Image: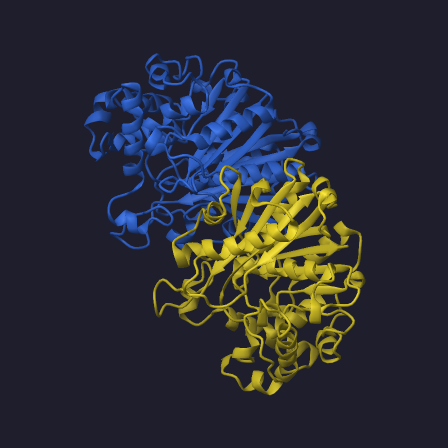
Chain colours: A blue, B yellow
């Protein structure tokens, strides 16, 4: 059970392609926004977990990213741990910050996520997943993998690519109200379907973009939460699981269902209690599968929930109100903490035109490391006010 | 304060250059040895922290190393977090395992460290530190940095390179009794001084070697420790600090002294209580500086302690009984956990010919990230029986 842990402050940069901004610059902006939001000073941070997934291979910086950012903030002499877990690196950093507060050793811990994907060290070489260079040469990249998943899933439920396009449309509609989102101009299902084919049935607008960005969350103990003027948000669960199931065979992510069950049990709530969720919508198809695998809808009803508008703003359980990975963007290490940013914003009732009325319980879900099922990871966090 | 956390099992591979062995193979051997040592089964492991510092840049594997090793051990479906912190990556993974047990969420957590340095992706290119490619082109590599530190330190205390050579001689003498050590043939001070000059005053045999290897430690709660037949070792402190002080200017590591003070305070003991220590002897000079900076000897008396034999086996406070980084080897991510391996072996009284008689309190110290003082890190752990 997770108790006595709160998010007291959040901050992030807009996501996008920023050739002139480095990791320190992006990270610093997120950290300063988070401490300002909490009404704390950065010197009150007692420990840091920094999530990043590709800074070593893309920028020659496999270690020390968190330290660089903290030095830029004028903070030295505290523990800083670098955390990597594929696309769930930010979620994992957040989780470790939660655990650090639970130990009782620290009252104010920073979870930081930062990534810069708009650079590539060697022009012309594909940006492959870890350990997949060989397969990458043959085109077995993430879109190809998730296209296989899509084929399995669509065959199972008897839906088609035209149905899936509505995920992109919905998330772009949400993103127009989020100033941090990488893409904010509304799109139509027609545009999604006729955009360039990447891996059938996934077109360009069926895939999330790459980009740069940073996000930060200040995780605090009961003691600090009690003395802050700021409304804080309780962390109810932190679940992380790796390596189970083959989604290309089943069209489902067993690792997600297992992580979700762990999270619901930790928090003592069920999926029916969730008011708003940010899921790992790296591709249109994955969002609807996640509805099912995170138990947010009955088996086989993912597409139905989507088409009925139940997961749109104003629906029963709005998903990806931030625009999601599809439109807000997906700078790997920052993504999981940006999800926390959105859910905290919603639960504080500060989401403006994209506010989910009366939201009091939220879920974040990040996944990664697919292509090799042994390393695939799922992270689920639950929040409440 | 750290309480209720124990090391129940340890395992490691020999350190050396093993072109035929991959990360999974090395890691698996360490994990199986650790669970066997504890009298547990790998399926009883509830969470994993995997430390590695260069697997991304050298092997294209920045994420998922821990998952690969666990899958090789037949364990899937548990949380696995990748941890990076330069040469202290293994120590940091160990620390996070300790914190995870302290949360009360887990009773059996694995700290794993693995690295493979005997491969280089692009022949002819220097193996530079993170973020130091530019400086590396001009020869500002770790030996050059620590040569500057050595100059400052030797000038301060009025000692010379011939004095420092005795660190290499001592640690090699210790290593001859350690079957896991990379180099075990005794060497003389003359050999150390006349070996190839790397960066004045540091000769080849004044520097630790590069190599491959893995180490694992099972960290358990009171509840599990109580039911095991195996003698367990208590973890008394875990201190991690980043980014303070410039050792080239002072000949000292302020970050180490600050980390050591945090650790002694956590454990409620002083340096005078330490019976045996493993320090980060990446270079001869750093070992003697560490005596001083970790407060194991009075200021200015590091070389005196060395030459008087106080830090040799049979002396007042034997240091690097495993052979240290100098002779046991330094596969970055594995190093910190291999230090835990040695201290646990000593405190259980199982070190054979290199046993420190009656040792009941031990210290490990790993550092890294120098060259850029903003990111430099120090990790100090204390253990007792």
Quadrant occupied by the N terminus of chain A: top right
- The percent coordinates of residue A170 (x first, y second) are 34, 20
- The percent coordinates of residue B379 (x first, y second) are 63, 56
Instruction: Say if B120 sits above or below B2 in the image.
Output: below
Dividing the picture into quadrants, the one containing residue A335 is: top left
- The percent coordinates of residue B265 (x first, y second) are 77, 52
Residue B360 or residue B238, whichever sits in front: B360
- The percent coordinates of residue B217 (x first, y second) are 61, 52
Q: Give left or right: position of A381 versus A180.
A: right
Residue B340 or residue A123, whichever sits in front: B340
Instruction: Say if B115 sits above or below A167 in the image.
Output: below
Q: Is residue A220 visible?
A: yes
Q: Give left or right: position of B161 versus B129.
A: right
Q: Give left or right: position of A310 versus A79.
A: left
Q: Is residue B255 visible?
A: no
Instruction: Say if A33 sits above or below B110 in the image.
Output: above
Q: Give left or right: position of B257 versus A62.
A: right
Instruction: Say if B144 sits above or below B86 in the image.
Output: below
Dividing the picture into quadrants, the one containing residue A322 is: top left
Dividing the picture into quadrants, the one containing residue B132 is: bottom left
Quadrant occupied by the C terminus of chain A: top right
């Amino acid at each position: 059970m997770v108790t006595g842990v709160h998010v007291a402050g959040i901050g992030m940069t807009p996501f996008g392609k920023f050739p002139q901004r480095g990791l320190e610059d992006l990270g610093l902006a997120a950290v300063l926004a988070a401490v300002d939001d909490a009404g704390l000073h950065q010197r009150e941070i007692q420990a840091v977990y920094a999530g990043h997934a590709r800074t070593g291979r893309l920028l020659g910086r496999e270690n020390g990213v968190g330290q660089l950012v903290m030095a830029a903030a004028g903070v030295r002499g505290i523990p800083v741990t670098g955390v990597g877990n594929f696309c769930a690196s930010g979620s994992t950093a957040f989780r470790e910050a939660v655990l650090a507060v639970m130990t009782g050793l620290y009252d104010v811990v920073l979870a930081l996520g930062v990534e810069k994907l708009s650079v590539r060290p060697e022009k012309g070489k594909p940006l492959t997943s870890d350990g997949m260079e060989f397969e990458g040469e043959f085109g077995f990249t993430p879109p190809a993998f998730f296209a296989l998943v899509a084929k399995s899933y669509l065959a199972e439920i008897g839906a088609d690519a035209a149905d899936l396009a509505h995920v992109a449309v919905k998330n772009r509609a949400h993103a127009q109200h989020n100033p941090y989102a990488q893409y904010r101009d509304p799109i139509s299902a027609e545009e999604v379907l006729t955009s360039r084919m990447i891996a059938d049935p996934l077109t360009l607008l069926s895939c999330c973009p790459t980009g740069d960005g940073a996000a930060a969350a200040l995780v605090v103990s009961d003691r600090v939460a009690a003395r802050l003027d700021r409304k804080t948000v309780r962390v109810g669960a932190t679940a992380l699981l790796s390596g189970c199931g083959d989604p290309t065979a089943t069209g489902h992510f067993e690792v997600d269902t297992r992580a979700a069950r762990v999270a619901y049990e930790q928090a003592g709530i069920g999926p029916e209690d969730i008011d708003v969720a940010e899921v790992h919508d790296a591709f249109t198809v994955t969002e609807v599968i996640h509805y099912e695998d995170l138990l947010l809808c009955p088996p086989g009803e993912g597409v139905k929930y989507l088409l009925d508008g139940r997961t749109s703003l104003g629906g029963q359980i709005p998903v990806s109100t931030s625009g999601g990975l599809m439109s807000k963007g997906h700078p790997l290490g920052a993504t999981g903490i940006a999800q926390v940013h959105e859910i905290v914003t919603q639960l504080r009732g500060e989401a403006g035109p994209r506010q989910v009325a009366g939201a009091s319980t939220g879920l974040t879900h990040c996944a990664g490391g697919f292509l090799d099922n042994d390393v695939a990871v799922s992270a689920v966090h639950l929040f409440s006010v």
